[in-house]
Image (cartoon, helix red, strand yellow):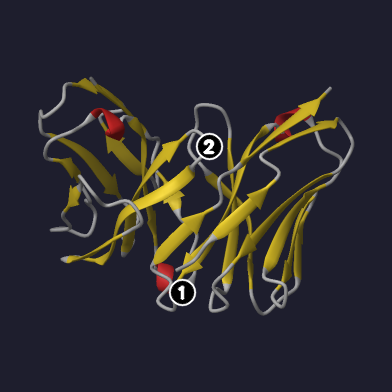
């Protein structure tokens, strides 16, 4: 089955700096990799996703990169702002049917003003 | 407004007292899923459903039941709750996860089992 490891578990950066969160997965059949942001007391919401036919995707200050050979994908946030402070989760489908989903254990990002 | 709703939002109960957490979506999504969120463990999938009358176990199904009699509803049933089921529960839906669609989460249900 799929195993997803996420690092680091906590990350503190100064406002304006960049933040990088990395996830590794085990199932080579996985081909969809979303990132969710969860603000305190709120539900997880998708911020960006990538499919296995591309290596990078950007949306303003957020980007995701995928290395299928090494089986890892990363979330990059540039020019961080205090409102980026949240818990971020990666996820990967599990098994060939893609019905099961495994989430990473989360990264608590703190942006210091 | 497209949304996933859960009820109740907060629940305190006692060991062994059966309870049901409802989940409903108005987006005509095929795929629905239940997760529990615990500190340090992230989101773990309990059960999922690909469509009406089609359900399957996730990673942590023990102690839970689900049903999918209608497309819009996917209730989570705890027949005999125990303290280790104290957690934050999220329902989610997507158009069809088989085509790698975004999951939309409900607001969460915080459960305390005494």
> Residue A82: which quarter of the image?
top right
The chain ID associated with circle 2 is B
Mark 1 closeness class: few <14, some 14–19, many ≥20 residues within 10 Å: few
Against B110, is B56 above or below?
A: below
Q: Position of residue A99 (x, y in %)?
A: 38, 68
User: Can you tell which of label 1 and label 2 is closer to the viewer?
Assistant: 2
Q: Is residue B75 left or right of residue A75?
A: left
Q: Tell me the residue that label 2 is attached to.
A: B40
Q: Is residue B4 left or right of residue B71?
A: right
Q: Position of residue A104 (x, y in %)?
A: 56, 51
Of the numbered discs 1 and 2, the one sitting upstream in the chain is 2
- Which residue is rendered at x = 64% and y = 76% of the image? A52
Q: CA distance from mark 1 to mark 2?
A: 29 Å
Is disc 1 in contact with disc 2, using a CB cutoff of under 8 Å?
A: no
> Residue A78: which quarter of the image?
top right
Q: Tell me the residue that label 1 is attached to.
A: B99
Against B11, is A103 above or below?
A: below
Q: Where, quadrant-wise, is the C terminus of chain A in this rendering?
A: top right
Q: Position of residue A102 (x, y in %)?
A: 48, 58
Against B82, is A100 above or below?
A: below
- Which residue is rendered at x = 24% and y = 54% of the image? B72
Q: Which structural element holds mark 2? A: loop
- Which residue is rendered at x = 20% and y = 45% of the image? B63
Residue nearest the viewer, comparing B11 with B30: B11
- Which residue is rendered at x = 22% and y = 40% of the image? B22
Q: Is residue B78 left or right of residue A81?
A: left
Q: Position of residue A97 (x, y in %)?
A: 40, 76
């Amino acid at each position: 089955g799929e195993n997803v490891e996420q690092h680091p578990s906590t990350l503190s950066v100064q406002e304006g700096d960049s933040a990088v969160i990395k996830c590794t997965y085990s199932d080579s059949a996985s081909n969809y990799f979303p990132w969710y942001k969860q603000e305190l007391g709120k539900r997880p919401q998708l911020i960006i996703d990538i499919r296995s036919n591309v290596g990078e995707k950007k949306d303003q200050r957020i980007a995701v990169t995928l290395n299928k050979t090494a089986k890892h994908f990363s979330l990059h946030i540039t020019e961080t702002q205090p409102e980026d402070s949240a818990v971020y989760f990666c996820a990967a489908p599990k098994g060939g049917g893609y019905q099961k989903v495994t989430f990473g254990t989360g990264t608590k990002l703190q942006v210091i003003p | 407004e497209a949304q996933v709703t859960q009820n109740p939002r907060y629940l305190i109960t006692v060991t062994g007292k059966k309870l049901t957490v409802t989940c409903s979506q108005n987006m005509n999504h095929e795929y629905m899923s239940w997760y529990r969120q615990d500190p340090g463990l992230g989101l773990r999938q309990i059960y999922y459903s690909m469509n009406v009358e089609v359900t399957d176990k996730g990673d942590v199904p023990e102690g839970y039941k689900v049903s999918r009699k209608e497309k819009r509803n996917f209730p989570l049933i705890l027949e005999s709750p125990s303290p280790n089921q104290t957690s934050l529960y999220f329902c989610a839906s997507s158009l069809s996860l088989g085509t790698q669609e975004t999951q939309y989460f409900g607001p969460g249900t915080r459960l305390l089992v005494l």
